[in-house]
Image: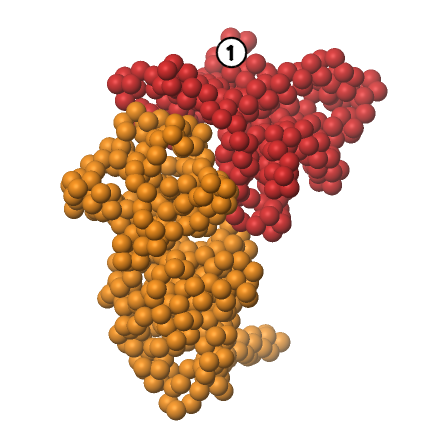
Chain colours: A orange, B red
Amino acid sequence: MKINKIILSLFSALAILLSSSVTSFAKVVGDKIILGSAISLTGKYSSNGVHTQNGYNMAVDRINSMGGVKVGGKTYKFEIIYYDDESNPKRAAQLAERLISQDGVEFMLGPYSSGLTKAIAPVTEKYGVPMVEANGASRSLFTKGYKYLFAVLAPANLYLDVAIRTAVELNGGKGVRIAQAFEQDAFSQDVRLGILDAAKETGSEIIIDDKLPKELNDMAATLVKVKQMKPDVLVVSGHTKGALTAVRQIAEMKVDVPMLAMTHCDAAKLSKQHGKNSQYSLCASQWHKTLTYKDDFFKDGMTYAADFTKEFGYDPPYQAAESSAALLVFKDAFERANSFDQKKVRDALAATNMQTFYGNIKFAPGGQNVDKPMVLFQVMCDDSGKCENKVVAPLKWASAELIHPIPKWSKR
Amino acid sequence: MVFQYPMISVQACLDGILLGILFALIAYGMALQWGVMNIINIAQGDLVILGGYIAYFMYLYGIHPAWGVIISPIIMYFVGVGLYKLVINKVVDRDLFISILATFGISILFMQLMNFAFGADVVLANSGYGTTFLFDSAVVLPNSKIFSAFISILFAICLVIYMKKSKLGRAIRATAQNARAAKILGVDTEKVYAATFGINAALCGVAGALISITFTIHPYMGLPYTIRSFMIVIVAGLGNLPGVALSGMGLGVFEEFADYILGTEFRIGAVFLLLVLILVYRRFKLSRKREYLK
């Protein structure tokens, strides 16, 4: 009786072992290259998660319908397995593990947000799975020596760098006085580090340096300081909440500052929610549809925006555009590697040097894209109160002239 | 900084008071149902946010969001009563831990439902109210904040009068004092509980509508409001309305000054430190009293 039990448990252990190891087979099936992605379809990142997924899907459809990926003389098509990570880093890491060891995925696309990418990167690295991500910009992702992580976007510390440099340029090359308020999360603090660097290089002085608690949606104290100390530039980064709060309270408290630069205005739909009060705000963006980069699949930004709007019913935010670009990078790398060997694809990715509608893509050894500057757009409104975002810096892509300094509230 | 620019102190005080009054309204609701039903409602903040969304949707459909302070509490009252009938009545006689668990569950459910229904975007409603300048425009007060404080006070006063004068108000107070005795004397405590929870939800609705006008709302932003009101109630004690109002304003002012003197990053930390100190002090006082009684 006892021996029977032992034999039974041995058999069942063996069965479990087999069933878990048998499933991992290579994930290029027939004429399909299967990519995996954990993405936030529910939870607090769900809106941006959906933008990311739409961006991925749009590129998959486009590449597949335009001839697919040619490897070894055969044509393959992309397919993506998605799992919902519920905006939860722990869940994202589990799902990455599941995609790789159970579903046998050999190539990954990134999730939404720096935090979730940070959770997944150690997993993909462990299994040597190349991951192209489009929505994790935190600087710490690129300093850990990851070999299989590639980001098509510019790192977080460059987000508002261009704003400081523009302000210094307008000040005749002399340093400016900066007031800054950043939320205490990884991303915003990276943006802050970028400002510190830019200030040091340009000889600018930081006179207010506030760190906003996460649960706070009141910036009145910071703005009172700004009113008293009259800096030349006010920089704010605190995700959507930060951008919306800043514009609301600046307008309510009639804070006059010559330049206001922020992140996440796109996601905040700043001009839609605030109308004319958001006028003259400068916003850092990874991409804007009026940029004149080109590629064979989406032609250019304007065409991409039109096609995207036709398919999904809204204007593409940059989160969607960069996600589409990730697939263009994968296609290019597969074709150059001419193989599905993970190592070879990884090397091909590292050697990427291409232009997409989203911008130039070339990876530094850390995995971040170094060939695409951030752009700044300014919210500009006409008399009827209709507002538009226009690129004003860097000058090469500017579609409108920067309005500087911001007119005083008493004259608006 | 505070000494360099003296006007900042005035600004900080006024900002803090206006902020505190709004928080005191939420805390008052919490104190009320805590006192009557002995339930700590973790979902308090989520009820606030739900109230905010009601005002926001009115704003989207072209109705001025200020009307939200009337519409939102009416809807929220029924939400509260419904919630009581579905969940709270099953935990009301149990110990505190079970009610905390139950309301924590409700909180998570509400967050996810709101996220599902309204999306994860941060939104706000614009009131279009201007700004008041004081002291040669050295002190600036957004009218939306003044409006919020005014409405909060108005609702608090109405509620106090209602509690004192109306039949239901008296029944609620009686139940809070001694539920069993009230029952024996013919008070339908079940009804009183439902009404109390409804009134609390309605207060949350008012506060939510005001927050959508003054700040921003997001499905996951409820917890800070729960914590803040919990703190105010702890400091003030139960059934002590002037205490709630005072501790709300006091905390608001303290917070603003902590921001200027210690820096924004220590603002919340300073408030929590104060809470710990107050709790320790209260315990100390209590133990002395007990000794005295011996």
* A20 in relation to A318, above or below: below
- Find residue B188 and report its image quarter: top right
Number of callouts: 1
Residue found 22% across the figure and 43% down from its top:
A170
Circle 1 SS class: helix
- Local packing at callout 1 (Cα closer than 10 Å; few below 14, some 14-19, many 20+) is few
Q: Is residue A352 rendered to the left or right of residue B155?
A: left
* B260 in relation to A202, above or below: above
Furthest residue to the top? B292
Disc 1: host chain: B
Furthest residue to the right? B186
Residue found 34% across the figure and 55% down from its top:
A399
Q: Position of residue A194 (x, y in %)?
A: 26, 48
Q: Amino acid at mark 1?
A: Lys
Residue found 64% across the figure and 36% down from its top:
B63
The residue closer to the viewer here, A116 or B57, is B57
Furthest residue to the bottom? A73
Disc 1 designates what residue? Answer: B289
Quarter of the image for the C terminus of chain A: give it: top left
Q: Is residue B211 visible?
A: no
Furthest residue to the front? A383
The residue closer to the viewer here, A42 or A248, is A248
* A26 in relation to B78, above or below: below
Residue found 46% across the figure and 46% down from its top:
A387
Quarter of the image for the N terminus of chain A: give it: bottom right
Q: Is residue A232 visible?
A: yes
- Find residue A155 and report its image quarter: bottom left
Q: Position of residue B66 (x, y in %)?
A: 61, 30
Q: Position of residue A245 (x, y in %)?
A: 44, 37
Q: Is residue A29 rendered to the left or right of residue A338?
A: right
